[in-house]
Image: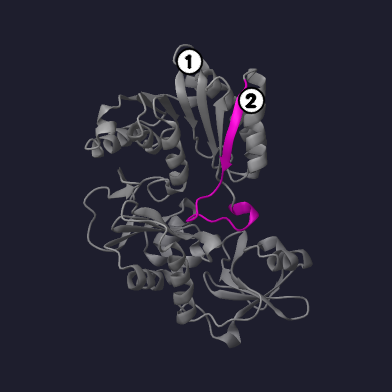
Amino acid sequence: MTTASPSPTTRLHLRVTPTAESIIRSGHPWLFAGSLRSLNRDGRLGELAVVYDRHDHFLAIGLFDPLSPLRLRVLHAGKPVNIDDAWWRHRFQSAVDRRRGWFDDQTTGFRWLHGESDGWPGLVLDRFGPVLVLKLYTAAWLPRLGELTALIREVLKPEHLVLRLARNIQEIAQKEFHAEDGQLLIGEKLGGRPVFLESGLRFEADVLQGQKTGFFLDQRENRRRVANLAGGRDVLNAFSFSGGFSLYAARAGATSVTDLDISPHALEACKRNFALNQGDPAVARCPHDTVQADAFEWLEQNKTRQFGLVILDPPSLAKREADRGAAIRAYGKLTAGGLRALRADGILVAASCSGHVTADEFFAAVRQAVRDSGRRFTELETTGHPPDHPATFPESYYLKCIYLKAAGDQ
């Protein structure tokens, strides 16, 4: 993957502020435009740029993006390296090899590459059975798209590879690189939504138009934990999306499952996923209801329905740092609503995927809402990222979940 890079004699050189030097040495993979002190020339989209420290020593090398405030995504820091085809192949194979043995033939949906934390900044690669989805969050990868595709084909040999693009890079992708969101890079036309396995359950993934890459793989371990808690309980899955938590609960012996979501498309996906698993006797026996409503409003207005297990898994409530305070208050309000719908002997599961809200802030908001309710709870555990979604720097920690059991439950 070297064709997009200029020769070493003309390579882009960057010098940065002392603070940025320290941040890069600490292992942080982002360099913002405001941290640049000088460039030896104008940089091109996607080319390799070398960062030098104040003593003209090599500091790091990364992908340059002149169009983004996040000007450089670091690929390597420390001693100089030669980034050639062999280097790219080794980095790709290393991420793949780390996941070998983590998943058996009953789980065919997982993440092969997780952005910066796997050494592939601004890029994720997910598997859904025979279909892989490559999502790009930075235009810096667009000049290397052909080489990326060839590398994925060589190492993983997928039947299909789908390209997904962050909204902010779709225009340049189409105009400059003739690439579009939902484009097939490998394989013939997809015949509908691919079906994959997770812990033996069948799910569809909306890989062409769905959120993120088509399914939220990062909650897999929490879905498995919910299964261990759901037996004999009526379950409310608020912000249900396509019903992942609900199917795990149904198979584990829940007495009923209710999916609550504002999106009719999400609830239709819930129904399709339940239909895919009717061959499982426990799923077939479990009554499954769907409610289309705003979860905040429904929980606020609900005065009658009570559940033995309430799951609160909203989408990100803080898209930017300015939203952080409002999001923390919203998590407290949401928890209070969930508690009102929880039986005296119930279990509350509350999750957050807001990267701008820290785990400590989120857990504090939930715990305060519990104290304000006047009810006694035992905290069972808190969880973070699954192994195929590693987090290696502060901004990469987004997923957190807390499990609380009402003290009346024996």
Amino acid type for the residue under numbered disc 1: Asn
Please tell me how crowded label 2 is: few (under 14), some (14-19), or many (20+) other residues with Cα within 10 Å. many
Q: For residue 42, which quarter of the picture? A: bottom right
Residue at the (59%, 53%) spot, across then down: 396
Residue at the (62%, 52%) spot, across then down: 395
Quadrant of the image for the N terminus? Answer: bottom left
Label 2 element class: helix
Is 398 positioned to the left or the right of 249 in the image? Answer: right
Label 1 element class: loop
Structural distance between the alpha carbons of marks 1 and 2: 18 Å
Location of mark 1 (residue): 302
Q: Position of residue 406 (x, y in %)?
A: 56, 23
Residue 84 visible in this rendered orientation of the protein: yes
Amino acid type for the residue under numbered disc 2: Ala
Is 174 positioned to the left or the right of 365 in the image? Answer: left
Q: For residue 71, which quarter of the picture? A: bottom right
Q: Is residue 293 magenta?
A: no
Q: Which mark is drawn over residue 369?
A: 2
Judge by depth and name the residue closer to the eye, 181 or 263: 263
Q: Position of residue 92 (x, y in %)?
A: 45, 70
Q: Is residue 392 magenta?
A: yes
Q: Position of residue 353 (x, y in %)?
A: 54, 42
> Quick one: label 1 or label 2, which is nearer the N terminus?
1
When the figure is inspected, residue 144 is found, relative to residue 359, above or below; the finding is below
Residue 121 visible in this rendered orientation of the protein: no
Q: Which residues are magenta?
A: 376-396
When the figure is inspected, residue 308 is found, relative to residue 39, above or below; the finding is above
Q: Which mark is drawn over residue 267?
A: none
* Residue that lies at the very extreme toward the front in this rendered image: 410
* Residue that lies at the very extreme toward the bottom in this rendered image: 9
From the image, state whether disc 1 or disc 2 is nearer to you: 2
When the figure is inspected, residue 85 is found, relative to residue 99, above or below; the finding is below
